[in-house]
Amino acid sequence: MSYANDRLLLANVSRRGLLKGLVGGSALLLAARWDLGLASEKAQFGAGAMPGGWVDDPNVFIHIDSDGGVTIINNRAEMGQGIRTSLVMVAADELGADWDRVRAQQANADQDKYGNQNTDGSRSMRHWYDPMRRAAAAARIMLEQAAAQQWEVPVHEVRAEIHKVVHSPTGRELGFGALAQAARDLDVPGRDALVLKSDSELRFIGKESGLINGELTSAHPKAIDGEDIVTGQAVFGADVDLEDTLYAVVARPPVYGARVKRVDDGEALKVPGVRKTLRIEGTGQPAAFNPLGGVAVVASNTWAAMEGRRALEIEWDMAPAGDKADYTSDAYRESLEAAAQSPGKVIRQTGDVEAALEDADTRVSATYYMPHMAQAPMEPPVAVVRIRGGKAEAWAPVQNPRATREGIAQRLGIDKESVTVHQTLLGGGFGRKSKPDFVTEAAAVAREFEGQPVKLQWSREDDIQHAYFHAVSVDHLEAGLDADGKAVAWRHRTLSPSIASLFAPDPKHKGEFELGMGFNTMPFSIPAIRLENPPAPAHVRIGWFRSVYNLPHAWAIQSFAHEMAMAAGRDHRDYVLDLLGPDREVHNLTVGDGWNYGEDPDLYPIDTARMRRVIERATEEAGWGRETGKGRGLGLAFHHSFVSYTAIVFEVEVSDEGELTIHRADIAFDCGPQANPERIRSQLEGACVMGIGIALQSEVTFKDGVAQQDNFDSYLIPRMPDAPRVVRVHLIDNPDDAMGGVGEPGLPPVAPALCNAIFAATGKRIRRLPVGDQLTG
Amino acid sequence: MVTLTINGREHELDVPDNMPLLWALRDIVGLRGTKFGCGIAECGACTVHLDGAATRACITPVSAVQGREVTTIEAMADDAVGQRVQAAWLDLGVAQCGYCQGGQIMNATALLKTTPEPDTQDIVDAMAGNLCRCGTYNRILAAIERASGKEASS
């Protein structure tokens, strides 16, 4: 079932056309989409192509008690995107459950049972909307069948309503609870027998509610974890409470790849509460998801462990770190800027760029820099592991439960069936908790304490100094304009260390999925284009950070398009609409991208009409073109990522002293069908704030391989005064396209839109992030 | 031994004098609604009330709170202002991941107790020490306005 084919192989038939309405929730038979007799063939795209695939068995996801309580299993990590509410709500709506009687239960790590659980790539809703609706529709039909059997009437005479089944001719009713046992014993109906609810029958899916642009419209269905969060009862990783718990912290090598040479734990062991110290072996470079190694201090409480760690005397062996111990950010940036002057590996080519640049009336050139950043979720990494009788049990805030389970199994030399991973709430993820190194680390400590749980806590210093850093990047662009300012040539060289360096010898070039994040998928219509990727070596653990390589690509491309518009003496919006060219669908393979976020290019082309619409909507809402007055300006940027479309306009003011005030943001967003608009809005509002930090504040620098920032006094992230008081989100009503991602696409255009607005206000061009003191200096 | 009064109850704890209140609450007393975020009073996730005033538990040694009233997020449901704040948080869907929100609510409640009708600048100033990586600031601001006497009387 996991790998049932969800790809229609109908040549010359527009699958998008066929699917229109389906994803919008119309009551169509699902047979056309799934039941093609190819169930054993692994899907090439979408949810079916993910490890573990999808599962839509109602017996796996939906449990109804005889008292009518409905439990819906959520198999995705909850890290603030609201998936525990949204996905459970999708199932509850289709089932017809009373929302007040629905509870969510978090799935343990088990992809064989629950399908893919790796929560990244903004995939949860777009991959699980259909399976959860099918599971719930199947459960609803089983309840109807059970009622029909009990009343001895034809099933077409009965109908599920809210939390009950009704026999229309006689008015008899039975609650879901009364039918639960009988329904459970029935066969699950085939997918060809499922009919989904029509839009008019839905109560929650696609319905706006809650706070919309500052106005409370209507009450939104209560958030699954809302009450627990505001009363302090929600259980995050560190809140797991097991008897006899030991507490551990780890002193890790200051430089990637270094090892412990000598340790004196004499003073540490004198700290009251400290039980033991032990060495954790790292696995060298590349680190993958393995611990970095170091010295663990185990104590009767977290504070004692931290005090013990302070008292350790450790001599580090830097030799295994190699050139990582020489890594210094300024020198590295200069080396990338120098490398950007020479041609690199050609990624995409149309026409003769060099000739077109030579012939151009005007040439525009710029180099952009984005630094390393740490994800810095408010909950630092933490995990609890107990090992007993050859079996391991972990409680942890992880985005990737399968990798967590396998990492523990591998470290302990046991099979994965002997490892149970309970997924807690995540106090933020942003990609950091895609890497379960901290859980494996806890397992490495817990194996020394048979039967006793070990809670391993990272401090904020640990988190920032030993992050899986967002890749530093240099992007060098050159364009040629004709006498009318029209773009005739576009050359873009992008340089960043690759995430692949985490798993294999450093390829020094970006991989397909990295280039596919807005670099080779650049949709502008320009006659001569050459995209190149010169080499850039990695010196630290590089990892996913919300939106990943879309961040530098959008930052550079959207800033540069603005520079071109200024060079052409044109209005920025008008200019980029011209750059986009006529409305068309750009197939990813035609621009050298074989990835397309894992999605079917026929279902998910890059649709420049959708891009145009978000640009038009954001600029209209922001009052583009109006007189803003001295020191004020509007700035625009837009980007396609995670198969969704975002455009942002900022209005900013910069005083004569260089003090920046962000007055307002207008965000237009098209993700196709919207499952839970209330949480889509919250994701875009949050991305706006996080993006402001990327633009203005956040940077991790290295000196001799050591991160120079270690807490929120040196690694800055936005605070309430930094956020614009007016953030308006404009959702594009588009039920007809396939569903796109939500958690990440709001972030990439924020920094370039803000810097373009700063230019509009001041004439000062920002090419190096963060802005920091560049406006006052 | 130190004696702490937490949410109206006395606790005798066998901990070093310099142990921060945060870790005494979490690891010794077992009240885990107060969160660890930075350890240096930069993020506010550990905010509690000390004799009613918002205080960062991560840098406050237990020795400094003997004989004083410690109130944590777990007690806010029994507090009239706390209830209003919690209700406003739920009405406006403030929380995303929720990790920082206990500290935000403690800080907001302390603000409303001293300044029942804060203006926007009062709120921004008072909340500037509480970080939220999810970026829920505008909803926090709106929820504080909603919970305030200003909103109630308007």
Image (tube, helix red, strand yellow):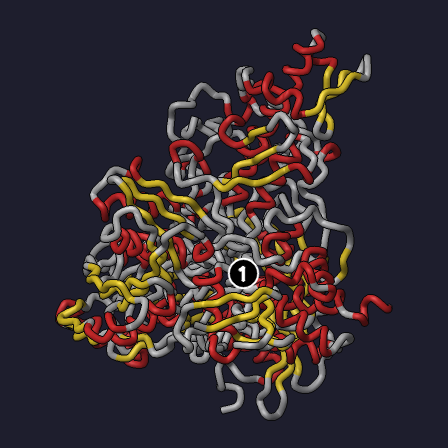
Tell me what residue is drawn at x 65 percent, y 82 percent: A653
Q: Chain of mark 1?
A: B
Q: Is residue A228 above or below residue A636?
A: above
Count every numbered label the image shows and give the total: 1
B89 left or right, relative to B22:
right
Question: Which residue, given by chain and number where applicable, does mark 1 sit on?
Answer: B33
Residue nearer the viewer, A349 or A440: A440
Tell me what residue is drawn at x 39 percent, y 74 percent: B16
Q: Quadrant of residue A508?
A: bottom left
Which residue is the extreme one toward the top? A152
Tell me what residue is drawn at x 59 percent, y 19 percent: A181
Q: Position of residue A571 (x, y in %)?
A: 63, 72
Residue nearer the viewer, A328 or A734: A328
Q: Position of residue A631 (x, y in %)?
A: 65, 85
Q: What is the three-letter code of the residue carrying label 1?
A: Gly
Tell me what residue is drawn at x 17 percent, y 67 percent: A259
A183 left or right, relative to A543:
right
